[in-house]
Image: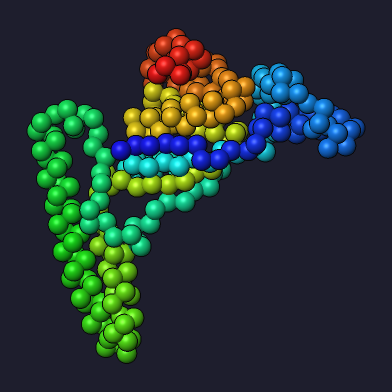
Amino acid sequence: MLSVVLLEYTRDPQKLVASAAKLCYSDKKVADLNAGISAESASKFVDMLSEMGHESPMEHVSFTFGIDGISRACMAQITRHRIASFSVQSQRYVKASEFEFVMPPAIEMNEEAKAEFCEAIENARKSYEKLFDILEKAQKEKLLTDGVSEEKAGPMAQKLAIEDARYVLPNACETKLIVTMNARELKHFFLLRCCNRAQWEIRGVAFRMLKLAKQAAPELFKNAGPGCVSGVCKEGRMSCGKAEQMRKIYLHDLDNT
Ligand SMILES: Cc1cc2nc3c(=O)[nH]c(=O)nc-3n(C[C@H](O)[C@H](O)[C@H](O)COP(=O)(O)OP(=O)(O)OC[C@H]3O[C@@H](n4cnc5c(N)ncnc54)[C@H](O)[C@@H]3O)c2cc1C
């Protein structure tokens, strides 16, 4: 089941962003500059930076999220964001016989599709186990023939078998990851992935991340969300046409949604 938590973030993020921006135009020493900024003036400053589009000071603060229970399909999309750091559970080292999986709601709601999906998952699970057994046996024999000790050959063969058996695992397989993004990249991520054009699973993840980030730094993420929240929709003829509704959600109703 999907779980998104904010593990860590830069202490006093808005103050740090304001300090970094003020430094550009100040002759004060860095330490004096930081001490002279109140929480209220930091908020106002951050607001002004957002309006001006002066976003580089936002790169000094970062947010680290723990995400559990997303599909490998979703993980492939998140990791396309290059200005981010990721640690992802390995299918090379962790045996996946009892893997959990994500079932898309449209499949879950359709009896026929659900039956097909469950059968495919079950088949993948069986093939994975079978391949693991075949490969483990073959690898162990080869290692022993090559002179590796019995004690070492067992674990080595298991690892090699896991590594190759995983090729039959489906995109639906659940995984977990830790992701760190700076605030500028996060806003960009929200712009793309909170949009109704984004795929449902990553949209759900981005939505939860935005709620957490906004609780931690309200001014920094004041207008964050899909493009239509802070300006005009840039999706052209692909636009969902729900800009008003999106603004209501992201600017006013986020805590209740
Ligand atoms: C609705 C939707 C549909 C999509 N469909 C597809 C698809 O069919 N096929 C597909 O392959 N991908 C698809 N994507 C993924 C998309 O193409 C991007 O790879 C992904 O959204 C990451 O965006 P990004 O490159 O802007 O962001 P990031 O990697 O997070 O980078 C942030 C920004 O930094 C700058 N930047 C980063 N790296 C470079 C660089 N090397 N050179 C210059 N500037 C850089 C860019 O300004 C970029 O916008 C889709 C995304 C969305 C939201």
Q: Could you say where residue 4 lies in the image, as x and y percent from the top left?
A: 42, 36
User: Which residue appears at 65% of the width and 32% of the height?
Assistant: 13
101 left or right of 111 in image: right
Q: Quadrant of residue 107?
A: top left
Q: Residue furthest right?
A: 27
Q: Could you say where residue 23 lies in the image, as x and y percent from the top left?
A: 81, 33
Q: Quadrant of residue 27?
A: top right
User: Which residue appears at 31% of the width and 82% of the height?
Assistant: 151
Count up the numbered dots: 0
Which quadrant does the C terminus fall into? Answer: top left
224 left or right of 33 in image: left
User: Which residue appears at 50% of the width and 23% of the height?
Assistant: 225
Q: Is residue 24 visible?
A: no
Q: Could you say where residue 22 lies in the image, as x and y percent from the top left?
A: 79, 29
Q: Quadrant of residue 60?
A: top right
97 vs 178: above or below: below
Q: Which color scheme is applied? A: rainbow
Which quadrant does the N terminus fall into? Answer: top left
Q: Is residue 97 visible?
A: yes
* Closer to us: 199 or 161: 161
User: Which residue appears at 29% of the width and 64% of the height?
Assistant: 162
251 vs 86: above or below: above
6 left or right of 146 in image: right
Q: Could you say where residue 206 lies in the image, as x and y percent from the top left?
A: 44, 31
238 left or right of 227 in image: left
